[in-house]
Image (cartoon, rainbow, N blue to C red):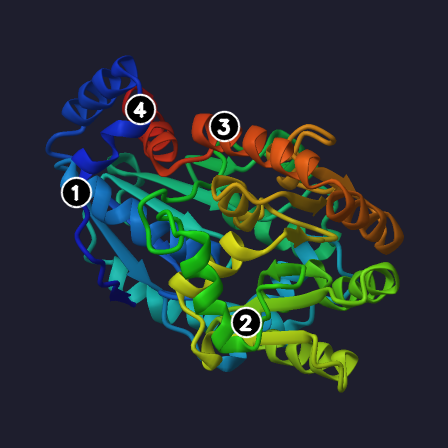
Amino acid sequence: MRKALVVKKNYNDYMQFMDERTREDMGRLVENLRGKSIAMVNATEFGGGVAEILHSLIPLMQDMGLDIDWWIMHGEKEFFNVTKAFHNCLQGDEACLEQETIDTFFKYSQMNAQKILNWDYDFVVIHDPQPIGLVSWRKAPELSHWVWRCHIDTSAPNPAYWQFLQRYIQQYDAAIFTMKEFVGEGLDIDRLYFITPPIDPLSHKNIPLKKEEAQRIIARFGIDSSRPLITQISRFDPWKDPLGVIEVYKIVRKEFPSVQLALVGSMASDDPEGWDYLYMALRRAGEDYDIKIVTNFNGVSNLEVNAFQTASDIILQKSIKEGFGLTVSEALWKGTPVIGGNTGGIRLQIEDGVTGYLVDTVEECAEKVLTLLRNPALADEMAAAGREKVRKEFLITTNIYRYLMLFNDLMQS
């Protein structure tokens, strides 16, 4: 395990997004935590929503005066293949839990646990299945509070995998899920909390970009700004349904032959399966040059993602399963209409017909895309309503506030 490096942020810059009472409450909660130390642990420093959140949350909490570190778990390809299987099976994939899988999981948990034997943190937050096993090596449980943060929808998990993980979850003092509906059946733990993921309104991915500048940036990837653009920004995995997005585009193109599709993704170090789905998407796109498939290996960074979200006519997040889907809030924050899969945390962000559309099938998604392309005024109205919802509920300041409340609550237990 190693500490992650973060870029300093100024908490005062974020005051503009909070009302006076919230600012006062934040100050009181921080003061209560003086002298306490916090560790956040996850599997990767870059790629995916968890790492992105921590790159904002950690430096902001540090600037508030809190003693907080971010640790990255070490793993090789064999370990991440195993934990990707855990990720998929917790969302319902059918697979047998082999002894070899258990052995690999235990081996890397034990290897990384050597580092925590010297820890004296008051609070430890473990993110997702990869590092969940570290809790078995915690020292002096009565002197620290360990919390498991699950970003996955475990409402209908593969029973074998869920039962295996429960033996670890039950060693934690508390667990955090995105929403109550995500909690797997039979979970026996004293304290449950519900915290939605946030976006950082001042990150490079979310700072305001003029549309002309955004169009100039995405032109480098072959996008013609004079023609309609549909974009999905997400990892390449089966739950994001990139192949379904391509089918949506093909239906829409029959009425709008000038439409373009961009699939924009970040290839994460803890997601070896992502390459398989990237290649599947490339094969499905074939020689249709109006489908642009680009990743961080093509020069896509946070600024380019911002540009795609700003310049697109419609953002899709056609997930089949989704823990939350930060790209929904990101796009709404930029005033771009969003159509999302009717699943998981996307339902928290999109009020169907008000802040966007929720869809269940390729055909329904294509129909809603056509509705918005035909009615630009309706698209603008939905996007404006969506931005206001994000401001109230899904910014990083709200996320910090909820963590501070949680830590203060645990101190009283």
Q: CA distance from mark 1 to mark 3?
A: 24 Å
Q: Nearer the viewer, mark 2 or mark 3?
A: 3
Q: CA distance from mark 2 to mark 3?
A: 33 Å
Can I make out residue 131 in this image?
Answer: no
Disc nearer the start of the sequence (2/1): 1
Q: Which residue is identified by label 3?
A: 388
Mark 4 in CB contact with mark 2 (< 8 angstroms): no
Q: Which residue is identified by label 1?
A: 10
294, above or below 160, in the image: below
Residue 348 image offset from top left, x and y in percent? 61, 32
Q: CA distance from mark 2 to mark 1?
A: 32 Å
Q: Is residue 223 left or right of residue 15?
A: right
Residue type pointed to by label 2: Asp
Disc nearer the start of the sequence (4/2): 4
Q: CA distance from mark 3 to mark 4?
A: 13 Å
Q: Nearer the viewer, mark 3 or mark 4?
A: 3
Residue 47: name its quadrant: bottom left
Can I make out residue 249 in this image?
Answer: yes
Residue type pointed to by label 4: Met
Mark 4 in CB contact with mark 1 (< 8 angstroms): no
Q: Which residue is identified by label 2?
A: 271
Secondary structure state at the residue bearing disc 4: loop
Q: In the drawing, what numbered circle is on residue 18?
A: 4
Q: Is residue 42 left or right of residue 229?
A: left
Alpha-carbon neighbours of circle 2 within 10 Å: few (<14), some, or many (≥20)?
A: many
